[in-house]
Image (tube, rainbow, N blue to C red):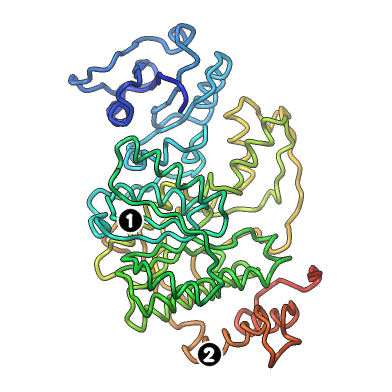
Amino acid sequence: MSSSGHYILGSNATAYHLAIMMQQLSPKLSITLIVDPDLSHQQLPDACNFPILQGNYQTILPELNYHFDFTITLDNISTQTLADLFHQLKNHGFKHTAYLPTLHHLPQLPIWLSSQQISSEHFLGRPSVSFPLDTHLSYLQHKDILVTGAGGSIGSELAKQLLRAQPKTIYLFGHGETSIYHTEKEVRKLQQHGLSPATTIRPIIGEMQDKAYMHYLIQRIKPHAIFHCAAHKHVPLMEINPIEAIKNNVFGLHHLVEAAKHFPPERFVLISTDKAVDPSNIYGASKALSEEILLQANHQGFPFFVVRFGNVLGSRGSILPLFQEQILKGGPLTITDARMQRYWMTIPEATSLVLMAGGVPNPKALYLLDMGTPIKTLTIAKQMAKLYGFDVDKGDIDLQYIGLRPGETLEEQLTSKQEMISATDYPKLLQVTKEQEILTPQALEALLQELQSVCFFCDQKPSAFRSYTQLLTILRRIFPQLQSDDTGDWL
């Protein structure tokens, strides 16, 4: 945040504790609480020593300094009320606004500081899930931690949250120098504010497809914990670049796992996706094979396991930034299909789930977050527009239906028919058990050898190199429901 002052609207515990934590991070920041009895009936603690403006919010608003930042902490308010509040703030010139409705976000304060102007939590259609991370990060204290894909949405936020564990070293691994540079800068900024300043931050630019390098890297740094976030994730893009999807997502992971078997960490967590369930596209197939690699390593006795996500709201490339950009340009809002629906989670939920699962004693092989019921993309688009003062149903902004893109489906499942879900000791954290693995260890090894000749040039099988047709033939033996075809095979 760039201003020297901050207003917090709300009289709940979230408002009070947020003010305290912000003051601790920035002692010179001017913080004022705004209490409107018509919007919140809760009472601030008697010990609250922050300046308080009390009265009708709309009456107070013109008196405020619009150069300051503004956070709304009201809970249990309707989308329309929240939309009206944001609209009024915009009309009075406020540029930096945020919505923080629950205490759930307080343990994720570094995430909040880097969040979008509108909180993604409001679109979940369910209460957000919080995990008591403060009591479950001791397993990372004074440890060396490797985060792959540290330049991505989940990897970068995970790196920031790891500071709360006060680790010895955080290695930020990725192959994009710009994104790794930005993550390092954000992490160091948090350290300057007093969050684990003694932790060493080491950015690493490398390529996971380089087997010898990955072996060298793991041997050199010997991390105590590995959080593998790196992956090509864009579904339509991977349909027209399928071999790169397999090279990066399958062989990149395979090389890391094999290196980690020689120098075993205390924890190895793979970030997976619900698209790995009965995959219909190349990206899903690549992640299903990634899960299989990790699960078989787990069965061999290694402390490796999988955390499966739904779609992440607010992540880079997700629909919220896209809708926000389209709304600011006056529309139209592009919708794939009115029937399309997805399971959603926020970045704080995603990172919390990873860190929580990583600290579970005697971890099982596969975990999943209870994400409630799926939400239609159209519903999120309408809610997003309403927060900016536009009513889609009244024609304030246009919708444009663009149809399914290559690899996309109308619905996704969290588990397959061969998987069973059971509760854990942690609310909303579920354990998934497979009735049988997709492949035996011997079959997986044989499959990887076949894919090797497609992804990497082999003197014995030169015709297989970069053959999309052969790739599909191999994958369909394992995933007969795969809908991909080679019509886009031009490279």
* SS for callout 2: helix
Does the rendering let one see residue 32? yes
Q: Compare residues 248 and 214 and report the one nearer the observer.
A: 214
Determine which residue is flagged by label 2.
443
Determine which residue is flagged by label 1.
169
Q: Which mark is residue 301?
A: none
Q: Quadrant of the N terminus?
A: top left
Outermost residue to the left: 47
Q: Quadrant of the C terminus?
A: bottom right
163 relative to 463 in the view: left or right: left
Q: At x 43% / y 13%, what residue is drawn?
A: 57
* Rendering coords of residue 414 (x, y %): 50, 64
Q: Compare residues 453 and 206 and report the one nearer the observer.
A: 206
Q: At x 50% / y 21%, what residue is drawn?
A: 85
Q: At x 60% / y 30%, what residue is drawn?
A: 386
**Which amino acid type is marked by label 1?**
Thr
* SS for callout 1: strand
Quarter of the view holding residue 46: top left
Q: Earlier in the sequence, mark 1 or mark 2?
A: 1
Quarter of the view holding residue 259: bottom left
Q: Nearer the viewer, mark 1 or mark 2?
A: 1
* Rendering coords of residue 142 (x, y %): 24, 56
Quarter of the view holding residue 243: bottom right
Q: How would you rate the neighbour count of disc 1 (Cα within 10 Å): few for under 14, some for 14-19, many for 20 or more?
A: many
**Which amino acid type is marked by label 2?**
Ala
- How many marks are shown on the rendered structure? 2
167 relative to 463 in the view: left or right: left
Q: Compare residues 259 and 122 and report the one nearer the observer.
A: 259
* Rendering coords of residue 110 (x, y %): 38, 40
Marks 1 and 2 sit apart, C-alpha to C-alpha, by 38 Å
* Rendering coords of residue 370 (x, y %): 41, 57
Asked whether disc 1 touches disc 2, contact meaning CB atoms under 8 Å apart, the reply is: no
